[in-house]
Image (cartoon, grey):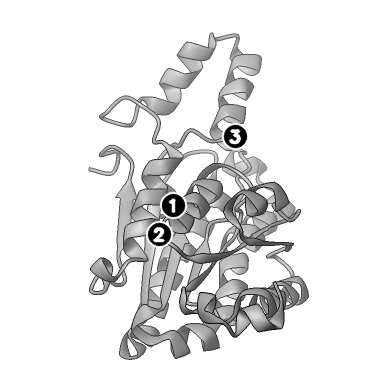
Amino acid sequence: MSTAQVSSGVMDRPHALVTGASRGIGAAIARALAADGWRLTLTAREAPTVLAQELGAFAIGMDQTQADSVAAAFDAARAAQGPLSALINNAGAVETAPFAKTSPELWQRMLDVNLTGPFLCCQAAWADLKAAGPRGRIVNIASTASLKGYAYVSAYVAAKHGVLGLTRTLALELAKDGVTVNAVCPGYTETDIVRDGIAKVVAKTGRSEAEARAGFTAGNPQGRLVQPEEVADTVRWLCSPAAGSVHGQAIAVCGGETM
């Protein structure tokens, strides 16, 4: 996109940056926001160029655990699409281990990608979002793991609890500017991460895929996996003017798992 385009009328549309946008929940969020007319910057470790071409978005690779990479990506996003109005912190990762076998390295990896990454992205977007005022939005994709404990993922759960704490703190700091800050907390969702988890259970235990899947859905009173589009629709609403008074909240999208 040229400098002339940046200064043209198309820049009247708000600009959202979505991290972890190459697949799963992130890709669903990108499609939902594009349908509402948002200009988009899509990031992942490798630039999600195919989806960006589909949606007319700007794509760039970013390692959100590294401050220099985050700063460079946000500068490129502004140059391509103009100032940010919304930040969707979706990128994350999970590794499993019993607590006694959780190494310091695993612990640090989970904190880096799931908590430090959103921290760095929020700082990089901070000035733009404050300038956006009541149109400004931060949506952190946390997890039901920010609301309750799960065995064998202590580092991930600790990081996601941190994301919720960060969300509430930023909500207080940005309230006077009109920017809303919220967390969306999906339960087990039909994504590659969960499908990989099901495959590992099958390989380790000899259970059928249906039996392994049932283990992932057992905690959901609806007895099913959440769909990425259901999470995306929640983000879409939070980014709309209709959610202007929804602030500092943790919205569980989990079929009632946290009841």
- State which tag comes first along the sequence, 1 or 3: 1
Q: Which residue is mark 1?
A: 32
Q: Element under label 3?
A: helix
Instruction: For the residues labelled 2 and 3, say whether their Cβ atoms are less than 8 Å apart.
Output: no
Q: Which residue is mark 3?
A: 192
Q: Nearer the viewer, mark 2 or mark 3?
A: 2
Q: Quadrant of residue 133?
A: bottom left
Q: Amino acid at mark 2?
A: Asp
Q: Residues within 10 Å of mark 3 (few under 14, many from 20)?
A: few
Q: Which residue is mark 2?
A: 36
Report, in whole angstroms, how far the alpha carbon at label 1 lies from the one at label 3: 19 Å
- State which tag comes first along the sequence, 2 or 3: 2
Q: Nearer the viewer, residue 9 or 240?
A: 9
Report, in whole angstroms, how far the alpha carbon at label 2 lies from the one at label 3: 26 Å
Q: Amino acid at mark 1?
A: Ala
Report, in whole angstroms, how far the alpha carbon at label 1 lies from the one at label 2: 7 Å
**Residue at (44% x, 63% y) in the render:** 37
